[in-house]
Image (cartoon, rainbow, N blue to C red):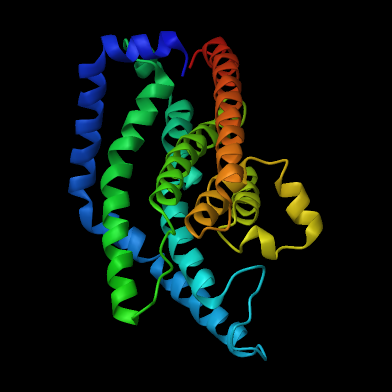
Amino acid sequence: MSWSTFSQIFRHRRKYLSVMENSLQEIAEYRLNFVLSFAYTLIPLASFILLWLAIYASQTSTSATIGDYSLSDMITYYILATWVNELNASERYIWRPSADINTGRLSLLLLRPLDSISYYFFIDLAATLPYSLMGIGLIAGFVVLLRIDLVHPNSFWTFSLFVIAVILGYLLSFIIGILRAIPTFWLENTSGFNQLLDWVIMIFSGSLIPLSVLPPSLQHLSLWLPFQYLVFFPVNIYLGQVPLLEALQGLIIELIWLIASFVGLRLAWRYGLRRYTAIGG
């Protein structure tokens, strides 16, 4: 965020805290649905684990690896990827600004002394904090129930870099999510575009399958996209698949993507608001 944005947030910090409080109250009213929405993701997770168990069982060697992943690595990858992917689900950020633009509620927000993008960020942050903790609890129960032997990070620094990568990935995912809502300034229905983008993100973030298992052409393409930093990069840091120096370099690249995406978001949002006010929204 720019310095002026930080300054604006600091001046109106109580209002933003009130936004977070209201968001938490909304979550509390629908807490069962909140829990079930994450628990639902454990079903495809179990399917993926069973699939890879069958694939590794078909290998001739008991110590077989696929794309540099042992069986324990692969299972740990999918468990962590499920949690990180749900934390960073960019489609979660689309509906509120899209609905506000379509219904005209954005006009009320523009009259407040709040930055619109920061407003949406604090709403989602209030949801993300309990959602991430609940996800850890549900996945921990899943791991214990199935007696899964997880791979642990090989050092404190590995785990620290993993946490940093997850935080940066969350911020990047939020920005991507709001960017996905901006076409609503021009189009009433963007569901087709967003469904297509969901699949692109799913493939190139590594949430569907590790990028190192994809064909070389797709691996090369992923290097030119920011999506790998949402799931694949942080999870690979945790698994020790990324050497320390490469992890630091990757974090710098992720930060560059974050800054560039934020600048693009600010410009696109400003341009969209001109369109919005021009049509009397």
Q: In this view, does 88 lie to the left or right of 55?
A: left
Residue 186 position, x and y percent, is 62, 26
Q: Nearer the viewer, residue 186 or 77?
A: 77
Q: In this view, does 47 lie above or below 32?
A: below
**Residue occupying image coordinates x 42% and y 8%:** 4
| Picture quadrant where residue 144 is located | bottom left
Q: Is residue 78 above or below residue 275?
A: below
| Picture quadrant where residue 7 is located | top left
**Residue occupying image coordinates x 22% and y 51%:** 30
Q: Which of 236 and 97 is in front in this view?
A: 236
**Residue occupying image coordinates x 57% and y 86%:** 54
| Picture quadrant where residue 62 is located | bottom right
Residue 85 position, x and y percent, is 47, 53
Residue 178 position, x and y percent, is 51, 32
View extreme (right): residue: 217
**Residue occupying image coordinates x 41% and y 51%:** 159
